[in-house]
Image (tube, grey):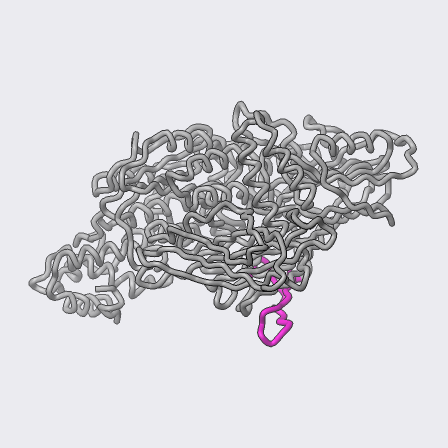
Amino acid sequence: MVNCCGLVTVKNEPVPLKSIVVEVSVQGHVATVSSTLQYENQEQSPLEAIFVFPLPGEAAVCRFSAKIGQTEVVAEVQEKQKAQEQYDDALSSGQQAFLLEESDESPDVFKLSVGSLPPGEKASVSLDYVTELAVQADDGLRLCLPAVLNPRYQPQGSDSGSGGSAQLSSVPAGSVPYSLSLRAHVSSPHPISRVESNCPLDPLNYLNTEKTQATVSLAAGHQFDRDVELLLYYKDTHQPTAIVEAAQASAKPGSLMGDPVVMLSLYPEFPKDVMSSMTSHGEFLFVVDRSGSMECPMHLGSGSQDRISSARETLLLLLKSLPMGCYFNIIGFGSSYESFFPKSVEYSQKTMDEALQKVKGMRADLGGTEILQPLKHIYSQPCLPDQPRQLFLFTDGEVGNTKEVLDLVKTNAGSHRCFSFGIGEGASTALISGVAKQARGHAQFITGQDRMQPKVMQSLRFALQPAVVDISVKWNVPKEVSVTLLSPPIRVVFQGQRALLYAQLTGESSGDTEGSVTVKYSLAKQPVENQLSFSLKPAEDTGMTVHRLGARTLIQSLEVEEREQDGEKEGAKEKVIELSVQSGVSSAFTAFIAVHKGDGEALQGQLLRRHVPTPMLYHSSMLMMQQCAMPMLMACSLRSVPGKLKLSKKSKRKDFDSPASTSKPVRDPLLQLISLQKASGSWVLEAALAEVLVKTEEEVSKPKPAQVDQEVWATVLALVWLYGFKMEAQEEWQFLAMKAVSWIQAQKVASVSECVQAGNTLLGCQVQKDTLGL
């Protein structure tokens, strides 16, 4: 039976994909990921299977091979149109063919066309890609294998064409009839401290006494039902490194693959005195997804809060943590967008209160997910003098026009920076990482049991702290050797950010075998200088990971240049195709094609097309499936549906005055205390504060030292309570506590020690005055 999308499904018949085996090789901050997908055609007819393959946004596909029966074919990179024509010709003449191409809409989606499989035949497809590992706020390096590709929402008026979204089927997680095994080999110049994952792992196995090499595997029996994350932690991770990779022996000297390539890693450490200094300037714009999918729970299982409630709590924290003197606005978006204020307003008690009232009424009620229009609106507003624009973007990342969004952000990169947050298992790495990278910000992913608030406050810390600026990189090499940069220059590095710079080394020196690089920058108006030496004649070929990532970096720059030219000039596109074919790295204009020339007999019977499902987590289509009398796999709707499956949710942390509740909610005391703080940073001595402290108003007022102002006393009590009872959540309240301390210091109180001591006695704590920062 064929449904309206032309997908073939037969009751209880297994899909062709049987298993996935992944081998990961990590070298410091970069990795090669090799995966093998096993297929079997159990139909009575020849089968064409299409698998939508999600990749990290910064990945470069570099090898693709296919094996049918005992015959293996290795793919080559060709111009996309030529590869598609060759694929179609092969199929029509009865030959097996495999095609791998980047989706037109999003660079992290690849379509894998397995081609014609005879009945009963087995096939295996091998795919290698290289990727830079994302740095997390706690200095961990994140490798993610995206298992879930949420159905991409296609904005109205956008031509879906043959983009990845049109080729997607989904089934409930747990029904996916294939499995995943993963093994990683980790190698680093610095010792490996630990490896963590959101999935069960076998114990870490060190391969040497220095602990610079180790292996780790997923525990047996893993089901491909969520994003698989590995988090790697190294010692001395802030030390800069320069790694040189030898040329490919078969490549022509002077070409990218025929010359050595050097990778410079810069991950500066920010001293404590810099970390404690905070700016009081800035225009803070909080752009929040209010599409229907934001009603989904934060994670699977009972007790999970929905995403929009978590976003409301997060906005409460952000609004209380902003410095006096800055400007702000909040924009909600879906199919349309709504701003709290016509333009950014100065942060004050009045504007903060007004914004908090609007936050309480925020719902996931704006339909689909269209990020482009609100961003265009923001960029059309002039920047405020001496108020650097800081954009915070929250979304579950289901858009169909990622490249268009990234182009817009890149065009406006000089005027702002963007901190992005991918919520849930299906957030697009290309979108979330892409906007942060283009706008010099930082990307965070909130998956599994993660809470949104700590990660967002980490990013606020980056936004409020000084950044590394005035960066210069000087290469010191013999005169016979020239250095060609493959990366754009590094303009700024924020706390917690890592920058990688790739350069091609052309020519050979008869004498010197060493070069060096001098990196200078300024941090909090203090100059810093690092000099690193590297070998001009590296001994071993490490699998061309660095070369391919250098090629990918250059290809990405050229692709943007070509889109900006809008096809008027052929130069950039031709360069991309030439570089892609030479390096074996995929691009938007090329595809991998492999054709197995059999006996060329005409196909017997009709060719069927079968879509391999990707797991689906809490989507409106689940409701459709449950209600559907037809026992078939349903294609997911491409548009977010506001009327969602109602899920029973018991929030671990009750939303601050959640608008949905009819009875009086049980309020989380931390959120209650935070909601009572004034914009200036102080608290008022009132009944609501006493309630949080589990005291009566009289019990709270009586121990106040005689000469101390009531507001100062209330603020000291709030700080003692935070440090005495809520240290586990310090990341969430650190900025509002810093504001409170600054406010107390501005009051020039003589008896602060007496206040702290009295507060400790009242609340049964032992918090030191120095701990509070007073």
Q: Residue at x 71, y 30 (%)?
A: 81
Up/down of 468 relative to 86, above or below? below
Up/down of 193 relative to 107, above or below? below
Up/down of 429 relative to 201, above or below? above
Foreground residue, 234 or 728? 234
Foreground residue, 442 or 568? 568
Residue 30 is drawn in which quadrant?
Answer: bottom right
Q: Residue at x 20, y 53 (%)?
A: 683
Q: Which quarter of the rendered picture does the C terminus lie within?
A: bottom left
Residue 267, x across and y down, in percent: 46, 58
Residue 681, x across and y down, in percent: 22, 52
Q: Residue at x 76, y 33 (%)?
A: 609
Q: Which residues are magenta?
A: 196-219
Is residue 457 visible in the rendered image? The answer is no
Residue 455, x across and y down, in percent: 42, 52
**Does the magenta-highlighted stretch encompass residue 675?**
no
**Does the magenta-highlighted stretch encompass residue 211?**
yes
Q: Magenta residues: mostly which secondary structure?
A: loop
Q: Residue at x 26, y 57 (%)?
A: 738
Residue 675, x across and y down, in percent: 28, 48
Foreground residue, 186 or 245? 245
**Residue found farthest to the left:** 707
Is residue 158 visible in the rendered image? The answer is yes
Foreground residue, 583 or 632? 583
